[in-house]
Amino acid sequence: MARRTGGPAGRGDQRLEAVVTVAALVLENGHGVIIVPPLPETALTQDALTVLALKNAWNGAIAASDRLRELASSVERLGTGGEGTTDGADPGLTPADLAQFHAAALAQAIAAEALRGLLEELQRKAGGST
C-alpha cells in the first residue's frame, strides 16, 4: 500500500469515512438537509466536495438542534398535571417520551460530533490548530 505524505495510508480517509457515516445516519433519520451541488458530479473538485461536506454536516447539526427545540415544550410540560409533581409524584413520563427524547438527543450529539470531527480534519489539512 502506498504511503501519503503526512501519515499512514488511509488514516485520514478512515476518519473522514467515519464522519461521513455518522452524518449519513443523522440525515437518514430525517435530521438534516442534503445540499445538491450546482456542478455536474464529474466536475466536482476536492474543494467543492469539502465545502459540500461542511454544509451538509452543518445543516445536520442545525436540524438535530431544531428537533431538540421542538421537544422543549414537551419536556417543560412534564410534571404539571395539576398536582405539581415536584414532590416526587409521577411526572407523567412514559417510555415513549423517553425514547423520543433519547433519539433526539442522540441525533444532536452525533451530528455535533460529526461536524466537530470534520472541522478538526479540515483544520489539520489546512495546517491550523484544533
Image: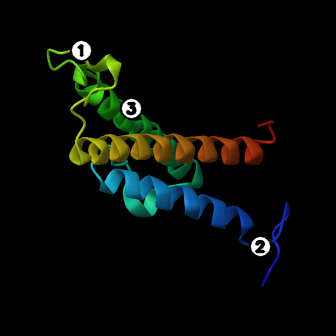
Looking at the image, which residue is at 44% across and 37% down?
61
Image quadrant holding the N terminus, namely: bottom right
From where the camera sits, is residue 35 visible?
no
Looking at the image, which residue is at 39% across and 58% down?
25
Q: State the residue lying farthest toward the left.
A: 82
Task: Name the quadrant containing residue 56.
Answer: top left
- The residue indicated by pointer 1 is 84
Going by the numbered disc 1, the residue's amino acid type is Gly
Task: Name the quadrant containing residue 119.
Answer: top right
- The residue indicated by pointer 3 is 65
> Where is residue 60 drawn, in percent x and y?
40, 42
For discs 2 and 3, the disc positioned in front in the rendered view: 3
Image quadrant holding the C terminus, namely: top right
Q: CA distance from mark 2 to mark 3?
A: 35 Å
Q: Earlier in the sequence, mark 2 or mark 1?
A: 2
Q: Secondary structure at mark 2?
A: loop
Looking at the image, which residue is at 65% across and 65% down?
13
- The residue indicated by pointer 2 is 9
